[in-house]
Image (tube, rainbow, N blue to C red):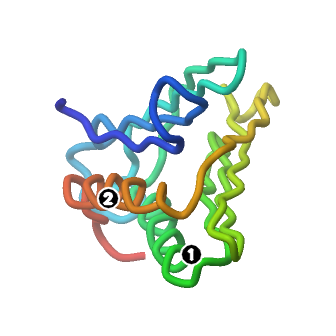
Amino acid sequence: MDHAEIIIGRDEQSDHVRIQVLDRMHPGCTDFWDGNWLTSPIYVHIGGFTATIDAGLRVDELRDFRVALERLYAQVGGSATLSSTEHWIELTVECHPTGSLSVSGIVADDPGMRNTLHFVVEGLDQTDLPPLVEALVAVEERFPVLGRR
């Protein structure tokens, strides 16, 4: 596989959100603002719905999501949110004291056009967090945050 992949869900046969991280959008840029954009299409398969979104996410957004997920896992409680600057995706993972997870979100096919899909990924628990964190770490290793804010 020549790209990094983040899957929120058990596998691709069940309900899930998959984010592919293909490359930097502006490969020659090394500054924080332009250099950290990633070509990152989002695929959603929830119930009878499927969506393909040609999104652009930022490395720092994915890093912040990973940090929040690690805290959520360690504390067995709280929430972590992936919120994209351009409103492609808003995804919240909430961990309950029992270890069960609530995952909900919204994706937009074109943030300016108001076409959105609201979704819930069910049946996940705390044991689903380490593979998600590992996938996010792999993205950061391949595409480290550039520049300074």
Residue at 49% x, 40% y is 10
**Neighbours of disc 2 within 10 Å: few (<14), some (14-19), many (20+):** few
Query: Is 137 in front, or is 103?
Result: 103
Q: Where residue 83 sits: x, y (%)?
A: 63, 56
Earlier in the chain: of badge 2 and badge 1, it is: 1
Residue at figure coordinates x 66%, y 61% from the top left = 100
Please tell me in which quadrant of the rendered image residue 48 appears: top right
Query: x, y (%) of residue 41?
Result: 46, 30
Residue 88 image point, x, y percent: 63, 40
Q: Nearer the viewer, residue 89 or 96?
A: 96
Quarter of the picture containing the N terminus is: top left
Name the disc covering residue 99, or none: none
Q: Circle 1 sits on which residue?
A: 72
Question: Please, what secondary structure does the residue beneath circle 2 have?
Answer: helix
**For the image shown, how many numbered marks are present on the structure?**
2
What residue would you read off at disc 2? 134
